[in-house]
C-alpha cells in the first residue's frame, strides 16, 4: 500500500513534535534513512546529521529527554503546514508554521522540510530552520 505525502508527513510530525517518540520517529525512516538539519552548527545540541534508524532513535531520544525539562508542545490549532509535490513522485516539500503559546505571546517557528521517500518511508529528510530556535 502506497502512503501519500500527507500521510507520511503527518505520521512523522506525530512521532516527533507531538509525542516525542524516538522509536516511532526512527520507524518512519528507511533502514538507511538520513535526517539532516543542514543549518545547525556542528556543536549544537540538536543533531545536524543522523544516518540509519539506530542513530536517529538514540540521538532523538537523547534530544527529547533534554527538551522535556522545559520544552512546550506546539499548539496544533494555531499551527499549520502546506505540502508541495514535485515532478519527482518520491520528493515533497513541507512549509511549516508551528505556533507555541507563551506568557508573552505566541512564538511562531517557521521551517521548510524536504522529504525523499522510498517504499513509503523517509529515505532522506532535510529540515531547514533557524538554529537559534533549538537552543
Image: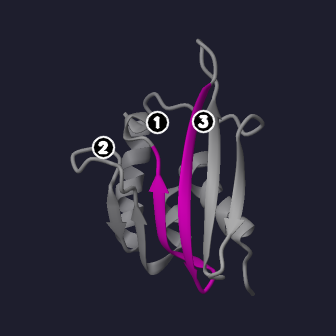
Image quarter (top left, top right, bottom left or bottom right) of the N terminus: bottom right
Circle 3 residues within 10 Å: few <14, some 14–19, many ≥20: some
Q: Residue at image x 74%, y 74%?
A: 4
- Provide the secondary structure element on which disc 3 rests: loop
**Which residue occupies the extreme top position in the image?**
104
Left or right of residue 74: residue 78: right
Give x and y (percent) for residue 127: 47, 56
Q: Which mark is residue 45?
A: 2
Q: Which residues are magenta?
A: 107-129
Badge 1 is on which residue?
68
- Find out whether residue 127 is within the magenta segment: yes
Which of the two discs, 2 and 1, labels the residue nearer the N terminus? 2
Tell me the distance, in whole angstroms, between the alpha carbons under discs 3 and 2. 18 Å
Does residue 74 sit above or below 85 in this rendering? above
- Find out whether residue 120 is within the magenta segment: yes
Which of the two discs, 3 and 1, labels the residue nearer the N terminus? 1
Residues at circles 3 and 2 in contact by the CB criterion of under 8 Å: no
**Which residue occupies the extreme right position in the image?**
77
Query: Relative to the observer, which residue lies in front, 48 or 110?
Result: 110
Q: Which mark is residue 73?
A: 3
Query: Relative to the observer, which residue lies in front, 13 or 106?
Result: 106
Which of the two discs, 3 and 2, labels the residue nearer the N terminus? 2
**Which residue occupies the extreme front position in the image?**
87
Query: Relative to the observer, which residue lies in front, 115 or 26?
Result: 115
Residue 44, located in which quarter of the rendered image?
A: top left
Tell me the distance, in whole angstroms, between the alpha carbons under discs 3 and 1. 10 Å
Does residue 34 sit above or below 58 in this rendering? below
- Provide the secondary structure element on which disc 2 rests: loop
Residues at circles 2 and 1 in contact by the CB criterion of under 8 Å: no
Q: How is the image coloured?
A: one colour
Left or right of residue 36: residue 14: right
Amino acid at each position: 500500500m502506497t502512503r501519500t505525502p500527507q500521510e507520511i508527513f503527518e505520521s512523522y510530525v506525530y512521532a516527533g513534535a507531538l509525542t516525542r517518540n524516538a522509536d516511532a520517529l526512527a520507524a518512519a525512516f528507511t533502514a538507511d534513512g538520513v535526517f539532516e538539519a543542514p543549518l545547525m552548527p556542528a556543536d549544537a545540541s540538536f543533531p545536524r546529521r543522523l544516518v540509519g534508524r539506530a542513530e536517529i532513535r538514540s540521538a532523538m531520544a537523547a534530544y527529547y529527554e533534554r527538551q522535556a525539562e522545559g520544552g512546550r508542545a506546539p499548539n496544533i490549532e494555531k499551527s499549520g503546514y502546506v505540502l508541495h509535490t514535485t515532478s519527482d513522485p518520491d520528493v515533497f516539500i513541507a512549509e511549516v508554521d508551528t505556533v507555541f503559546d507563551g506568557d508573552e505571546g505566541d512564538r511562531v517557528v517557521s521551517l521548510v522540510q524536504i522529504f525523499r521517500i522510498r517504499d513509503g518511508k523517509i529515505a532522506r529528510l532535510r529540515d531547514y530552520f533557524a538554529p537559534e530556535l533549538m537552543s
